[in-house]
Image (cartoon, helix red, strand yellow):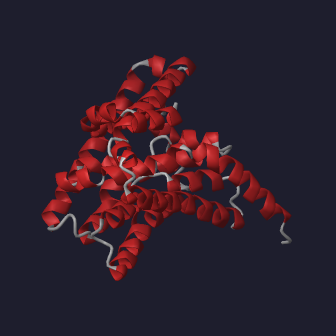
Amino acid sequence: MLVLGLVVGILAPRLAKELAPFIFPMIVFLLFLSTLRVDVLRAFPAWADVPGYLGITLMMQVALPIGAIGLLAVMGALTSILGIGMVLVLAAAPLTGSPGLTLMVGGDPAPALRQLIIGTMLLPLTVLPVFWVMPVFGSPAVVAIAAAKLLGVIAVAGGLGLILRRCFSFFQSFQGERAVEGLITVVMAVVVVGLMSAVGPALLTASPELWRTLAVVFGLNFGAQITIFLGVTRFGRAEAAPALAVIGGNRNLALFLGALPANTASDLLLFIGCYQVPMYVTPLVMAPLMRLLKRRMSDMPS
């Protein structure tokens, strides 16, 4: 379903263009479905584990993007679309479908789910220092407005999903959860068609910008996943390595579309569309690669 959505988005540019205005509403709907699928309060980590998840969130959503801003500023690439896209990827919360992707690569989805909850809840706060130093946002008032928009979206979509799950027992049943999972998959496959609206035309015109962007997003996504997987495994947390790797590389970048200035959001569509490719093929690439890396690391002398 996920790969089919990518193909349709590339081969049907007219359909992709028609769906493009609905990208942000569909992303919000996915956030709603995620809280409808999972009881957030029960899935919330034990209080003793919260500092660990909080530390990971601050590392992934604050330290990494701030570090990237410094590096890109030195290189003179901070105001480029590639530079802005890279920073926003690192500043974003884990992808809504990251627990499902973790299952597909053969890992335990629980750490991904808990990290998703913590990261999304804290996103309006973690973006403040990142937005503050990003030239694209400008004044502190604009930064505050952008963060408030994110907070409102997360609160409304997440709160409504939580309320409906608590009020209707069907959503707490096995059949209800499977039904919502199926709907999430369908919506993800549809939203990626709209997200590819800038990729199809660029592919047809053989745009050099397309190939540069694809090279950057593949390196950023899979580079982050491989680095995190190796690092976490080496530090004795092999059971959590697949989940942390998946959420490290796969972020809910499209959620920023509602907070960005309109012209910047439009310019970023090619980057966001290209970023869907490594995200949606993560199970196909990372599952065998993680098995290979794990086997090689176990064969190494201690």
Q: Position of residue 253 (x, y in %)?
A: 37, 51
- Examine the rendered structure and indicate whether residue 280 appears above or below residue 239: above
- Examine the rendered structure and indicate whether residue 210 appears above or below residue 2: below
Residue in the picture at 42% in, 70% down: 63
Residue in the picture at 35% in, 60% down: 85
Q: Position of residue 178 (x, y in %)?
A: 54, 23
Q: Position of residue 274 (x, y in %)?
A: 42, 50
> In this orientation, which residue lies closer to the viewer: 120 or 96?
96
Q: Can residue 98 be seen by looking at this rendering?
A: yes
Q: Dividing the image into 4 quarters, which one contains the C terminus?
A: bottom right
Residue 108 figure quarter: top right
Residue 237 figure quarter: bottom right
Residue in the picture at 67% in, 64% down: 230
- Examine the rendered structure and indicate whether residue 241 appears above or below residue 5: below
> In this orientation, which residue lies closer to the viewer: 263 or 61?
263
Residue 10 figure quarter: top left
> Does residue 284 appear left or right of residue 134 in this picture?
right
Residue at the far bottom: name it: 74
